[in-house]
Image (cartoon, helix red, strand yellow):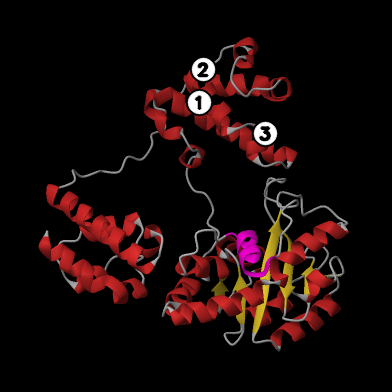
Amino acid sequence: MSSFHRQAGTCEIITTTARLAEIAAILSRQTEIAVDLEMDSLHHYREKVCLVQVSTREQSWLLDPLALPTLQPLADPLTNPEIVVVMHGADYDIRSLHRDFGIEVTNLFDTMLSARFLGIAEFGLAALLRARFGIELDKKYQKADWSKRPLSREMCAYAAADTSDLLPLYDQFRVELEQKSRLEWLEEEGRLVCQARVSEKEGPLFLYCKGATKLRGHSLAILEELLQLRDRQSELLDRPPFKVLSAETLLEIADTRPKSLHDLSLVKGMTSGQLQRHGAGILSAVERGLTTLESDLPRFPRGTKKEVLERVKERLKNLKSWRERYSLELGLDPGVLAPNWLLEAVADTEEAAKEELDAIPGMREWQKRLFGADLVQILAMA
């Protein structure tokens, strides 16, 4: 068990540039370090990194970016290709490190991806630490507002626990991946995850609203007006949009088109507080959507969905049957071995040739090596 678990709550919080430089120097002398982030997306309009947890095999620290003028010293160990950076479910943390601090990770080992490549069904960190070390993680602060200061002793303990036992987990997984000849898979995925970046939303907001595809014409115009209203209010109140008005409520308003506060009060999910704060604005948004000119009505981009040829259907069926057998043989989730989008792209290739597989965007090199010949053979049969 890690030193942190033996001394729960004693983790040092780093708030000065001088001390950060000392910690970065210690980290730069390691061969592997564990890293995790805490953010405040459930509590504020613009998400930010509020805490960075780092652990060596002996110690853990909490770096406070809200107190520190810069995290730049941390870039040295994180970008050093000789140092393995161990993270769990790293994708969004990698994006956030780059977004907030311009820091990139070079040599990533993701314990969640490792668990999936080992065929482990329960791959959450709490489940893994319980199964491997008998450690129980307290997830009480999973949805806490990490931008609040001071951090309580319990919150510090919670945060540090996310990295203090990652390195022993890394040790086990690395050996097991090597034994199964899957370490190269993990390393390739890690390189790809390190390239992940936060992308700004482009175009109308309805494109990002689940359920919007059911709407057409003026209902879609109303929804866009409502989403724009909610976004403005969210920024003004510094609250996440879903905490101002739920998407389900906005979809129902767009569909039922209420004309009065009484009509609006009948909408499912509409509280009296929301009615008081946003009622007039919502009715104005509905009116604007209803009076949108026909030529200006928003439209959902419709893919020119070509008719699926019988031959492609047959290929896809054969590919899924092959995947079912092969994933069972390897002890892997079928989606980990070959996700549906990949099988659909393979089924849609013109010729049964290795060159065709090489041209499929997103297909991994480990997949080509492992079962590329199988795919070519299946395509040749259909």
Q: Residue at x 25, y 72 (%)?
A: 372
Query: Are the residues flagged by discs 2 and 1 in contact, CB closer than 8 Å?
Result: yes
Residue 135: name its quadrant. Answer: bottom right
Q: Earlier in the sequence, mark 2 or mark 3?
A: 3
- In reply to whether residue 128 is colored magenta, the answer given is yes
Question: Pointer 2: residues within 10 angstroms few (<14), some, or many (20+)?
Answer: many
Residue closest to the eye, 128 or 294: 128
Instruction: List x then y, in percent, for residue 283.
Output: 60, 19
Residue at mark 1: 222
Q: Residue at x 61, y 60 (%)?
A: 127
Q: Residue at x 71, y 41 (%)?
A: 239
Q: Earlier in the sequence, mark 1 or mark 3?
A: 1
Amino acid type of the residue that numbered disc 2 sits on in the rendered structure = Arg
Instruction: Check disc 3 and report its element: helix, strand or loop.
Output: helix
Amino acid type of the residue that numbered disc 3 sits on in the rendered structure = Val
Residue closest to the eye, 33 or 240: 33
Residue at mark 3: 244
Instruction: List x then y, in percent, for residue 245.
Output: 63, 31
